[in-house]
Structures are given as C-alpha cells and as structure tokens.
C-alpha cells in the first residue's frame, strides 16, 4: 500500500517530536564487548567469536534501521486520529487539534454505577462466614461515602442535550437515587447481620443490573453522539483523499478490548471491520507518543507482511506461529 507524504512538512515535525528519540542501547565498540551480549557458550574459538560479533552487529543495525523506517513511515501518515481518554486528537497537514468529547455527566453515570459494584467487591471474598473486623470497618467507611453522595446528588447536573429524546433530567436523577439508596440499604443489612450469604450478594447484583445498565445506555447515547459529531465535523473539514487515508488509534484498557465501544464506532464510520488497516486498538497505552509509535509499527509491519507473504496481516501474529504449529502437530504434547 502506498502511503501519501504529509501535505505540510510540519506534520513530520509534529509527530516526530512526540515520538522522540529511539531508545536503542549504545553499540559496544569492541568485539569483546559485543560478544558478552550473546548467550553463555562453551565456544571460545576466536574465529567463532568474531563471526558471532559480526552477526550481532548486523542484527543491531537491523533494529536501528527498523526504528528509522518507523519514523519515516509515520511522517508520511496523514491524517491520524487518536481516541485518548475523554479527548479526540487529530493530526492533519501539520496541525494538531484536540477536543474533549466526553462530558462530566458521562463520568457521573459511571461513578454512580460503581457504587453498586463497590458493595460487591468489598464482600465477594467474605461470603458465607462472619465478617471480619477489617471488612466491617471498610463497609462502615464506605457507607459514609455513599451517604455523602446521596446528600449531594441534587447538586449535580443530570441534563444533556443528547438525552432529550430518551429521558428527562428528573427521571435520570431518580434513577441515581435508586442505585445509591439500594446500595446503602444493602450495606446496612450486611453491617447489621455481620455476614453475607453468597446468594444474597448475587440477588443484590441482579436487582441492580437493570438500573446499572440503564445508566450505561444513557452514558453511551451521550458519548457516541458527541464522538460522531466531532468525527463528522473533522471529516467535513478534510478532503475525501485525506479521509480515505486516515488512520485511527484507540487507546483503551485490557478488559474492554472485546467489542470496545470505540472499536464498534470506528469500524462503522471507516467501513473497516477488522483491526490493522485503518484502525488499531492499544491496551494500556501510556501516552500519545507511544500511540504514534505503535501505529508506526503496525503500518511498517503491514508493508513487511505484504512484501514477504503477500498478506498485509501476516505480521500481526507471531512470525514463528506457523513453525510452532508444524512442530506441535508433528510432536503431540501429552
């Protein structure tokens, strides 16, 4: 696949500034120093050691060249969009734009849901036995926190324009009170009985599920609406060629990877169901520079896969996987 050069040289500078310098260890200057990086071996023949050193140097050069190729390819990638927590970032023609698309109410809905979840995690490992003093103290302290939330729910805004066709702000507030009140009553019961039968805990969770998921539904009406509005605004601001060449990086956690909401959205808006070509998902990616570096790896490895295997997706799985399968098929493990 041919990657277009950025229309503006500043695109290269902006992205490469984020990527920074490649962290490659300094190459030793002597053959003796190089050879010490090799696995311990009984071979001491000077000719063998020299050959090993030359191979190590060639491999070192490969890694340096790979890093260089990644920087070159990311400089040509234009535009790039990154989903980074509450923010959406766009690199287009040398300019970096950022907008917050996740509002406070989205977080508030999740945080109220977490109140019910907290009751579960505090008790799940202490069921069917008398509650120990530490668990009782934990529950007592958390009950105070829940009381404080309940006293302040009316002070928070439960209104969002995206919800006007779904639920009123008053009804949304009522649901938050239902979740908080039910959790507080449940905690009071646990503290009174000083025990928690497993089935009682499960029953509480099942009662809370419809309320918790109703919050989730409303949260996603807000988030997906805002995300789509911003993406469409940026799409309309760029040429059709730019849109066809866009690459999206979704930064997320490990557990949400399967059917992640942002994956679902970009799969539809890019008409690209499978990861690797126009969008990628990065688990626990620490920062924007790491996201760009990972995108560069994906783009370069797609080219490698196409060149060597006529399959751009081949390097998105272990290079040694086919060889390992051959061995394991031939030598069944008992």
Image (tube, rainbow, N blue to C red):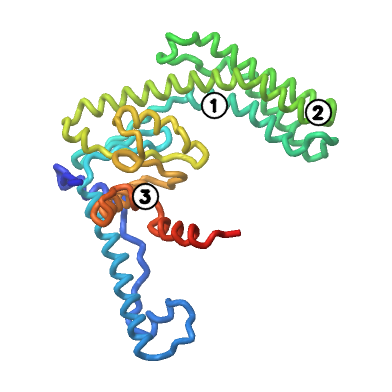
Q: CA distance from mark 3 to mark 2?
A: 52 Å
Instruction: Give the class, few, some or many, for how many residues have Cα within 10 Å of label 1's Cα (few <14, many ≥20).
Output: some
Q: Is residue 275 shown left or right of residue 331?
A: left
Instruction: Give the class, few, some or many, for how many residues have Cα within 10 Å of label 2's Cα (few <14, many ≥20).
Output: some
From the viewer's perspective, is residue 13 above or below residue 224? below
Q: CA distance from mark 1 to mark 3?
A: 34 Å
Measuring from the top left, give residue 296's x and y in whole percent. Answer: 30, 50
Q: Nearer the viewer, mark 3 or mark 2?
A: 3
Nearest to N terminus: mark 3 or mark 2: 2
Residue underneath mark 3: 316
Q: Quadrant of residue 43?
A: bottom left
Measuring from the top left, give residue 56's x and y in whole percent. Answer: 35, 75
Q: Quadrant of residue 160?
A: top left
From the viewer's perspective, is residue 333 above or below residue 123? below
Measuring from the top left, give residue 149's x and y in whole percent. Answer: 63, 23
Instruction: Give the class, few, some or many, for how many residues have Cα within 10 Å of label 3's Cα (few <14, many ≥20).
Output: some
Label 2 secondary element: helix
Residue underneath mark 2: 191
Direction left: furthest residue: 7
Q: Is residue 277 shown left or right of residue 156?
A: left
Residue underneath mark 1: 110
């Amino acid at each position: 696949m041919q990657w277009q050069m950025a229309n503006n040289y500043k695109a290269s500078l902006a992205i490469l500034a984020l990527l920074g310098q490649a962290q490659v260890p300094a190459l030793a200057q002597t053959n003796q120093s190089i050879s010490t990086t090799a696995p311990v071996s009984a071979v001491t023949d000077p000719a063998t050691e020299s050959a090993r050193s030359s191979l190590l140097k060639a491999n070192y050069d490969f890694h340096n060249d790979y890093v260089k190729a990644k920087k070159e390819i990311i400089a040509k990638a234009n535009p790039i969009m990154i989903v980074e927590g509450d923010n959406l970032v766009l690199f287009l023609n040398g300019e970096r734009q950022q907008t917050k698309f996740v509002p406070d109410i989205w977080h508030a809905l999740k945080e109220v849901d977490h109140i019910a979840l907290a009751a579960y995690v505090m008790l799940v490992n202490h069921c069917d036995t008398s509650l120990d003093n530490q668990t009782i103290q934990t529950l007592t302290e958390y009950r105070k926190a829940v009381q404080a939330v309940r006293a302040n729910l009316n002070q928070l805004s439960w209104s969002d324009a995206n919800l006007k066709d779904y639920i009123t702000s008053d009804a949304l507030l009522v649901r938050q009170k239902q979740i908080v009140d039910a959790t507080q009553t449940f905690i009071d019961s646990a503290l009174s009985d000083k025990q928690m039968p497993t089935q009682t805990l499960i029953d509480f969770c099942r009662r809370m599920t419809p309320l918790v998921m109703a919050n989730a539904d409303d949260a996603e009406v807000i988030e997906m609406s805002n995300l789509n509005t911003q993406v469409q605004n940026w799409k309309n601001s760029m040429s059709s060629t730019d849109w066809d060449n866009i690459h999206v990086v979704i930064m997320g956690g490990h557990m949400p990877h399967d059917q992640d909401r942002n994956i679902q959205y970009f799969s539809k808006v890019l008409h690209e169901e499978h990861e690797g070509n126009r969008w990628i998902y990065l688990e626990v990616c620490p920062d924007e520079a790491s996201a760009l570096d990972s995108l560069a790896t994906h783009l370069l490895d797609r080219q490698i896969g196409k060149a060597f295997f006529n399959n751009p997706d081949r390097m998105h799985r272990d290079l040694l996987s086919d060889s390992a399968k051959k061995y394991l098929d031939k030598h069944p493990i008992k």
